[in-house]
Image (spheres, rainbow, N blue to C red):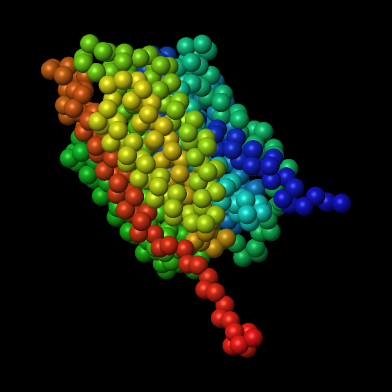
Amino acid sequence: MDPKPHDHTRAVFIALVLAGMAYALSQTVVSPALPELERSFGADASSIAWVLTGYLLAASVATPIIGKLGDLYGRARVLTIVLLVFAAGSVICALAGSLALLVAGRVVQGVGGGIFPLAFGIIRDTFPQDRVATAIGGISATFGIGGGVGLVIAGLIVDALGPSWLFWLGLLALPAAYTIWRDVPRAHTPADTRVDWLGAALLSLALVSLLYGLSQATDWGWGSAGVIGLSAAGIVLAVIWVLVELRVEHPLVDMRVLRRRPVLMTNINAVLVGFAMFASFLLVPQLAQTPERYGYGFGATVTGAGALMLPSTAVMLFAGPWAGRLARSSSRLPLVLGSALLSLAFVVFAMAHASIWEIMAGGALMGLGVGFAFASMANIVVESVPSNEVGVATGINTIMRTLGGALGAQLVATLLTSKTIGSSAIPAEAAYTDAFIAAAVAAALATAAALSIPRPRRPRPEPVPQATVAA
């Protein structure tokens, strides 16, 4: 007898977690190793930054397009291909003998941006209904968990094995690809399937212009012609893309879906939560590594600074599934709680960062907030769109996080350079306080966006027949 589709849900869930972790690790594990990579390849800071920028741009372009391809051609089939390509990019990076080849490998790795939207669609299609919210919560949590773990283990791997070993972590995608190919039922592809390649090209150009402009804001200056020009071009291209999507017969994204209030407010929330989370990835390790002689900081090593993220990462491990359980009654509730807790965490950071225990307490609050928020974002979007739009809609939500993260990282870097100690390049303690407050405000605005999501409507009770009342 053939097994039922849900007989393999545990194996599929583990495979999706592995896939998500592989992608999330690759986002942050490289950041602490950039100075070592710079020395290894004899590059300058602006050149080595392309190891991050190339990955960011490729992922932003790939995420919504791959999500749509999964909606059209079958999510299991497309996810298997994406994981194999991601693993190939990891091998290229690990074996790269030049900076150009390393950046090329990172661009190939960026295709992994489509992992999360495809995973959410697979869960919705193949898991029992009562387990969908919890499973999506668990997968969503890996985005934050992997990012935190990447910061923790990067120093250990570089010190013990060398920077090239950071990229072998991407081979976690291979067992995930095999399990997805083996256990997830294949979807039927409609005969009239079409891809809106014009819409895909316009969206890609808009995202590249906007994200590249933001990524250069610290180096070029926020008021520079390059940043303003690229940002303006990205916004204009985005407007053109929307106009085109409203007119084509088979759009890449159905604009009516994105205009729905739950989806729109969740995407706004994603930008603001992404801003706060990526700000913390930059602020906490850098503050911890500041020598104590400057009046703050702990003089930590790269590994020690990453270890301060452990409480945040550990809490996320439980927050995602917990939020999924809360989402069974209302996905809005954990999003509101998560955004509010994230704002509170940055208030704690701003007011108390003189000891390691204060940083770890703030980190635990942050992990709870991020875990709740990420898990509920995906659930709200999945609940609010038709099945054939899940991939692209969750892909757009992921991109909103990326945009927020890019903005947060650059604004925080600008704040840190605005107040320095004397003539040195060391940020003053007040600069960190300003940056923590900016992140707290962003998370507070995310809470307001979450509160504006309509409450789920409860079904009205059936009227009792008069005859029954009389009896």
- Where does the image place residue 133, in percent across and percent down from the top left? 56, 51
Asked which quadrant contains residue 262, the reply is bottom left
* In the foreground, 119 or 362: 362
- Where does the image place residue 163, in percent across and percent down from the top left? 48, 17
Q: Residue at x 64, y 33 (%)?
A: 174
Q: Residue at x 21, y 19 (%)?
A: 426
Asked if residue 427 is positioned above or below residue 66 in the image, the reply reads above
- Where does the image place residue 228, in percent across and percent down from the top left? 22, 44
Quadrant where the image shows the C terminus: bottom right
Asked if residue 458 is positioned above or below residue 378 in the image, the reply reads below
- Where does the image place residue 362, in percent across and percent down from the top left? 35, 31
Counting every numbered tag in the picture gives: 0
- Residue 421 makes an appearance in the image: yes
Relative to 19, 12 lies left or right: right
Relative to 70, 430 lies left or right: left
Q: Residue at x 32, y 59 (%)?
A: 239
- Residue 58 makes an appearance in the image: no
Relative to 188, 4 lies left or right: right
* In the foreground, 405 or 283: 283
Q: Residue at x 35, y 20 (%)?
A: 356
* In the foreground, 180 or 14: 14
